[in-house]
Structure formats: C-alpha cells, structure tokens
Amino acid sequence: MNTDRRNHERVPYAGRAYLTYGGRCRSDEVVELSEGGLKLKSSARIKPGKAVKVFLPLPARLGWRLCMLKGEVVRRDRVGHGDDRLAIALQDNQDDNRGALNEYLNAHGHTA
C-alpha cells in the first residue's frame, strides 16, 4: 500500500531556511523543495499540525530573493543523531511568495 501523500515533484536543494514558530526562529538545512512543501533537516521538536513560516533564500537572476512561505508541519521523522527531518506542507491560498518558489522550481528542472 502506498502511503505517500506528495502530489508534486521534489527537487533537491542545498541551502538553509529560517523557520519561525511559536515566537521562535531557527536556521535549518533544506533537503528538498516542491510546489506543495519542503523538507528540513532539523532537531526542532515541532508536532504535526503546528503552523510555521519559512523564510527561504532562493537564487535569482540578480542575486538572492528571500521568500516567505506559510505552512504546517505534517510529519516529523526521527532519524537520530541530530539528523531528524521535518516535512512541511505549504498552505493553499496564502499571501506568500509561492510564485517565486514556482519560478525557482521551473528553472531547475521541475515540470508542473
């Protein structure tokens, strides 16, 4: 039985993002991106269902563009040794920088 709920092609990403939640801010490594979400390498103890904001620096034509994306933690995978993963689903119909994310994904081999 396939329990994978992802609907979008994922793209590997080498960089960091700033994750804010509950008045806290931290910097975590981004593992992969898609139109519907992202995965972070993070030791943050955030339970699924928690709303978060992710500030993601994306390379752009004239430098860098900082994108603010609103989402919700959907899974926390405990791998151990500080190598845990947070899966974040981006919320639909939010006033964020989804267009900039899609532009980056399309420029890096993602097909919608």
Image: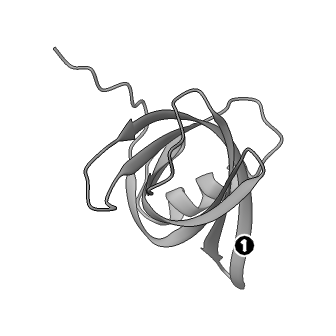
Question: Which of the two residues, 18 or 90, is positioned nearer the viewer here?
Answer: 18
Q: Residue furthest bottom?
A: 63
Q: Residue at x 43, y 34 (%)?
A: 75
Q: Position of residue 2 (x, y in %)?
A: 21, 19
Left or right of 52, for residue 1: left
Q: Position of residue 99 (x, y in %)?
A: 71, 51
Question: Which of the two residues, 32 or 80, is positioned nearer the viewer here?
Answer: 80
Q: Position of residue 40 (x, y in %)?
A: 45, 55
Q: Residue at x 52, y 33 (%)?
A: 47
Q: How is the image coloured?
A: one colour
Left or right of 98, for residue 105: left
Q: Quadrant of the N terminus?
A: top left
Q: Amino acid at mark 1?
A: Arg
Up-down relation of residue 44 to residue 35 (above or below) = below
Question: Which of the two residues, 92 or 17, is positioned nearer the viewer here?
Answer: 17
Q: Residues within 10 Å of mark 1 (few under 14, many from 20)?
A: some
Quarter occupied by residue 70? top right
Q: Residue at x 73, y 69 (%)?
A: 66
Quarter occupied by residue 60? bottom right
User: Regarding mark 1 in the picture, which secondary structure is present there?
Assistant: strand
Left or right of 55, for residue 102: left
- Number of marks present in the image shown: 1
Find disc 1 in the rendering and name its residue.
65
Q: Position of residue 79 (x, y in %)?
A: 25, 50
Up-down relation of residue 12 to residue 8 (above or below) = below
